[in-house]
Image (cartoon, grey):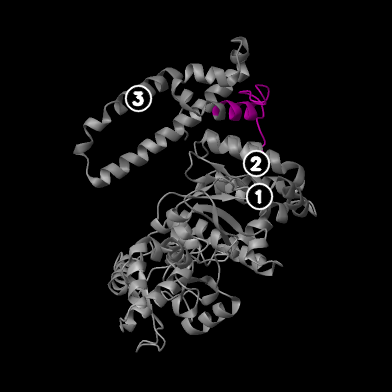
Amino acid sequence: MEQPTAPLGERRSEIEGAVGALTGLGEVLHQASGAELAELMGIIDGLAAQAAAARVTITAEALTRGEIAASGTNARTWVRDHAPSLRQGGAGHVASVAAAITGGGALWHPDGPGLDPDSPLGMLSAGVTDGTVTPMLAAAAMRELERLDPHLRDEAKPTVARSLLDLGIRWGPSTMRRLRPRLLAEYGHPGELDDLQQRLAGAARLSAPFVESGDLTEYQLLMTPEQATVLEAAIGRLSAPAPDDETGERDLRPAGQRRVEALTEVCRRSSSIDAAAAPDGAAGAAAAVHVTIALSDLEGRTGCGEVMGSTATGTVLSPETLRRITCEADLVPHVLGTEGELLDLGRVARLFTRAQRRRLWRRDGCCTYPGCDAPPAWAQAHHVRHWADGGLTDIDNAALLCQRHHTVVHQRRLMAEVLHVPDEEGRHVVWDLGVGSYDRHLERLRAEAAAHDPPPLTPERVQELLAAIGGDDPDESRWAEIELWAARCETDDDGWDRADHPERGGPPMASLFDEVA
């Protein structure tokens, strides 16, 4: 036998008692055990669900009676006025669901037939009333059903509504949108999914770059399912975590960083192919990146470089970033002297030829960083002694590195030894993983060079040498010194012609003799 419904006055008293019981609950929770805390959470969740349902039913009753219309306002404003907590959000959901299940106040009568429980709206109403469907989920389901309704077969609409609600109850409203293509494919009119995806093509877009305060560059990207499938196939494996079993290093990059680095790598490979196929090489290719930077900044790792000639014009790149990408396939540096004059215009930074890269593929076999087995097709030819530091572009100064470890090597300033004969582990490239090993190597080279360099060839020194030559001094070393300086005045160790670039280390030999004369 059913229990008689409690009158409103009694229910109101119980509701007020529940509100009082919840007030200050945190002050006594220390008395609860762990199991009791879990039980309390379940009880209060049920209470909150019933309270959300009651908000909808009260609003529906006010609509049916005409109370809201008589107040001269709309349902959303009425809810906000009388449920102040919903001013923080949610009043629109309560109002829209109440209006839908009452037909704006015309369908819901105490003695009327009500809604068909098997109709989509009847299912929504029943779920909201018993507290299993929140107003937010119900509002999202109504929007999705309204969007799908013209494309669905009539007999399939209740099934679709039930599927959406069941999915939303388990996983939240956002999952309902993901189900749309499958629902159209299974329950839509013939060709509906094809029509939908054709219409999506016009809405897909990639925004122009927006730089926020000179830091990260922001894009907005919307893709069709086909485009998204191609993108995910391209970056999927590249964006997977890559811990290093040999060194024990974990891949601590967050998923978003791994994905954007994978997308960058895919774009880099594509632009490299386009650049290589250009008639004038990378310098004449539309895919090449042109960057201006002062020579002193590139050598001293100070200042910055600036991109030009593309939609990224004005983007600022740090010297260390430029040093790293000068190993890669699509950078054309415009190097400036101290007075802003062009010292090197259009010299393509990727000086490794295709034949050299293929030879590196055979020699190294994969990324040479310890513990990494990224295949050679994913790797870049790295100048072991950096291009900006006068490193030669030959096999003995090259090592394959994947994008991730190429960045690590430059950030940690690591040096490697390139072996003509592989060591006992079969390696042609052996890395010194001590942070700053590259800089220590350069310091040793400079110290060795300084120990063997002759004294500066000043006009006074030339006078001494000429006097010695004109006399009877049999010391052949002076002739050797003159020949050495003549050679050095033509071209220095970094390959710069001193006759064209006196700022690289002194005047040419001829000018010294002219001055002496």
Q: Quick check: can you spot residue 324?
A: yes
- Report the span colored magenta: 94-120
Q: Foreground residue, 280 or 164?
A: 280
The residue singled out by tag 3 in the image is: 19
**In this picture, is 261 found above or below 154?**
below
Q: Foreground residue, 408 or 319?
A: 319
Q: Whole-percent x and y of residue 116? A: 67, 36
Q: Give the numbered dot on residue 90.
A: none
Residue appearing at x 26%, y 43% in the figure: 36
Q: Secondary structure at mark 3?
A: helix
Q: Give the numbered dot on residue 144.
A: 2
**In this picture, is 67 found above or below 499?**
above
Residue 109: image quadrant is top right
Query: Going by the image, does 207 lie left or right of 356?
Result: right
The residue singled out by tag 1 in the image is: 180
Residue appearing at x 66%, y 40% in the figure: 120
How many C-alpha atoms fall within 10 Å of the one at disc 1: few (<14), some, or many (≥20)?
some
Q: Closer to us: mark 3 or mark 1?
A: 1
- How many numbered markers are drawn? 3
